[in-house]
Image (cartoon, rainbow, N blue to C red):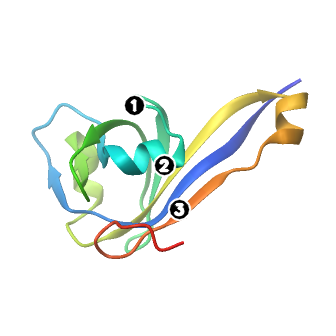
Amino acid sequence: MLREMFIAKLHRATVSRTEIDYPGSLTVDAELLAKAGIPVHMKVQVVNINNGARFETYVIPGGSGEIIVNGAAARLAQPGDRIIIIAYAILNEDEVARNHPTVLVLDEHNRTID
């Protein structure tokens, strides 16, 4: 049996800016993606702590400290909002037993604090 499991999370990331005219996706600091083990173009769920909005998109790499909500999803966030970025993967039973999700807690400048 295959199961969809949580594998990585960037907790309390701060939205740097929004780009409504960008054709889609979520721009995330490339170093944070690497540290969390989230590959470029991976589908993620985004939860906005400030307003409760939830949406799915994919990640693209950005510069240092950048978290940019692009495209239509930009209507669901504002600069300064705190968000949770959650990555999931389809795992088989053996992988489920060995899954230890990576959780990075971020400060207001999107630097890892835990």
- Alpha carbon separation for disc pair 1 and 2: 12 Å
The first of marks 3 and 1 along the sequence is: 1
Q: Could you say whether the residue bearing mark 2 is in a helix, strand or loop?
A: helix
Q: Could you say whether the residue bearing mark 3 is in a helix, strand or loop?
A: strand
Q: Residue at x 75, y 49 (%)?
A: 100
Mark nearest the camera among 2 and 3 is 2
- Amino acid type indicated by mark 2: Lys
- Amino acid type indicated by mark 1: Val
The label shown at residue 40 is: 1
The label shown at residue 82 is: none
Residue 59 lies in quadrant: top left
Residue 48, compared with residue 36, is above or below; it is: below
In this view, the residue farthest toward the left is 21
Residue 93, compared with residue 87, is above or below; it is: above
Mark nearest the camera among 1 and 2 is 2
Q: Residue at x 62, y 39 (%)?
A: 88
**Rendered-image quadrant of the C terminus:** bottom right
Residue 94 in picture, x, y percent from top left: 90, 29
- Alpha carbon separation for disc pair 3 and 1: 17 Å
Residue 82 in picture, x, y percent from top left: 37, 70
Residue 48 lies in quadrant: bottom left
93 horizontally vs 38: left or right: right
> Label 3: few (<14), some or many (≥20) within 10 Å?
many
- Alpha carbon separation for disc pair 2 and 3: 8 Å
The first of marks 2 and 3 along the sequence is: 2
Residue holding disc 3: 104
Tag 2 near tag 3, CB within 8 Å: yes
Residue 53 in picture, x, y percent from top left: 42, 60
Residue holding disc 2: 35
Residue 58 in picture, x, y percent from top left: 39, 35
Residue 15 lies in quadrant: bottom left
- Amino acid type indicated by mark 3: Leu
